[in-house]
Amino acid sequence: MSIHATADRRLATEHWLLATLPTPLRDRARWEWQQHRVAMLPLGGLFSAVRIPECLLVALSTSAEGGCLDEFLAEALGGGPVICDPRFSRYYALVPASMPATLHQMAEAWRALDVDCLGLGSYLGVPRLDAVNREHALASYWSVPMESAAVLCTPLAVARLIAAGRHCVDTEPEV
């Protein structure tokens, strides 16, 4: 019974992600997932993303290893979905589409940390839903998998994570 529920939830989540695209482009995104493991999806309609550099997370975590960062993010963001782009050492917390507008002033202060709120007019490389580990060193993967359609990180949890990271970076001694 749970096998079907998991498969149904994954299919519903895939459909929800693809709903960011006009119908004619959805097949292209599915093809990109099959061929490249990542599809470019527009932000600002159903969801937005907050880009967080790995160095900010390492300052907060007890380990710089990717698997440990993934576990840390899952706990810190209450299981909200996060994509890792290991090629550029960045993480993308998926948040409600309204986040960039509601936290605009904070986002300006975050830019000095290389944190950015990405919304309308931005695209994000979204891995296929089964890409959940670091086996492909240069390919994006789900650091914290998207478990269900429309279940996103809460803006407050993301803001708290960034504020804590900023505090750690500001208080680290110069080497």
Image (cartoon, rainbow, N blue to C red):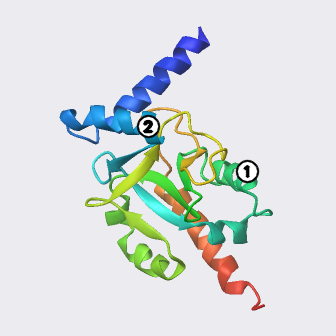
1 vs 2, front mark = 2
- The residue labelled by disc 2 is 35
155 or 43: nearer the eye?
43
Task: Verify CB contact (< 8 Å) between mark 1 and mark 2.
Answer: no
The residue depicted at 37 percent of the width and 62 percent of the height is 118
Q: SS for tag 1? A: helix
Image position of 85 with respect to 152: above or below:
below
Is residue 156 found left or right of 49 in the rendered image?
right
Image position of 83 with respect to 160: above or below:
above
Disc 2 marks a residue whose amino acid type is Gln
Among numbered discs 1 and 2, the one appearing first in the sequence:
2
The residue depicted at 33 percent of the width and 36 percent of the height is 18
Q: Position of residue 58 (x, y in %)?
A: 70, 67
Image position of 13 with respect to 96: above or below:
above
Q: Quadrant of the C terminus?
A: bottom right
Is residue 139 found left or right of 173 in the rendered image?
left
Q: Quadrant of the N terminus?
A: top right
Q: Position of residue 94 (x, y in %)?
A: 46, 51
Q: Position of residue 135 (x, y in %)?
A: 67, 44
Q: Position of residue 20 (x, y in %)?
A: 29, 42
Q: CA distance from mark 1 to mark 2?
A: 25 Å
The residue depicted at 29 percent of the width and 36 percent of the height is 28
Mark carried by residue 170: none
31 or 58: nearer the eye?
31
Question: Which class describes the residues within 10 Å of circle 2: few (<14), some (14-19), or many (20+)?
Answer: few
Q: How many marks?
A: 2
- The residue labelled by disc 1 is 67
Disc 1 marks a residue whose amino acid type is Gly
